[in-house]
Image: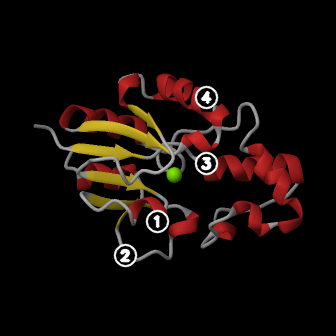
Amino acid sequence: MKKRIAIDMDDVLADATGRFIEYAQERLNWHITREDLNGHHNWAGIMPDQESEIRSWLHEDGFFRGMQVMPDAQEVLEKLHDKYEIFIVSAAVEFPLSMKEKVEWMQEYFPFVDWRHLVFCGHKYMFKADYLIDDHERNLIAFCEGQPLVYTAPHNIYLTDYQRINNWREAAMFFEV
Ligand SMILES: [Mg+2]
């Protein structure tokens, strides 16, 4: 039986951080780099005066749909898909509009992932898999039955408790595809 890998979307398959930087530049004329975001868990908290505006982007048409794909993610996920059972597990319910956009985004960039393998949820702890690739500690910490892998993003670079995957090339090496 194939081993099962649960894979997060934002900041794992999709460049959510890059999208935030793009919006910050366009909407607030705020020129921020990825390095500026190192160690920050809450984007909105970095600029307290703009917090409500920043939060509103997440509920705006097109915010999720316009995200770039992470480098090499398409090629590597297609290889993983042959060798493992893949589920895309996203805590998308917090942003209802994002669910439609995320389905369309997956169909455009990862058409080989069947819609039955997309899981939109709130918590992820009840999901059973052999591996979870995620950028958020709150998801990794609760994933007890399989191996949690932290996918590097600015907000998690100081996290040391998990095996780290820095990019999709490294994921390919880890999973030997
Ligand atoms: Mg994420």
The tag earlier along the polypeptide, 3 or 2, is 3
Residue 66 visible at all: no
Badge 2, how many Cα within 10 Å: few under 14, some, many 20+?
A: few
Do the numbered discs 1 and 2 sit on residues whose CB atoms are within 8 Å?
yes
Q: Amino acid at mark 3?
A: Ala
Q: Which residue is mark 2?
A: 161
Q: Is residue 14 left or right of residue 87?
A: right
Q: Picture coordinates of residue 62 (x, y %)?
A: 71, 31
Mark whose residue sits in front, 3 or 4:
4
Do the numbered discs 4 and 2 sit on residues whose CB atoms are within 8 Å?
no
The color scheme shown is secondary structure
Q: Which mark is residue 137?
A: 1
The tag earlier along the polypeptide, 4 or 1, is 4
Q: Picture coordinates of residue 36 (x, y %)?
A: 69, 69
The tag earlier along the polypeptide, 3 or 4, is 3
Q: Picture coordinates of residue 54 (x, y %)?
A: 79, 53
Q: Secondary structure at mark 1?
A: helix
Q: Amino acid at mark 4?
A: Glu
Q: Which residue is mark 3?
A: 16
Badge 4, how many Cα within 10 Å: few under 14, some, many 20+?
A: some
> Does ligand 1 reach within 8 Å of label 2's beta carbon?
no
Q: CA distance from mark 3 to mark 4?
A: 13 Å
Q: CA distance from mark 1 to mark 2?
A: 9 Å
- Quarter of the image for residue 177 reads top left
Q: Picture coordinates of residue 93 (x, y %)?
A: 57, 40
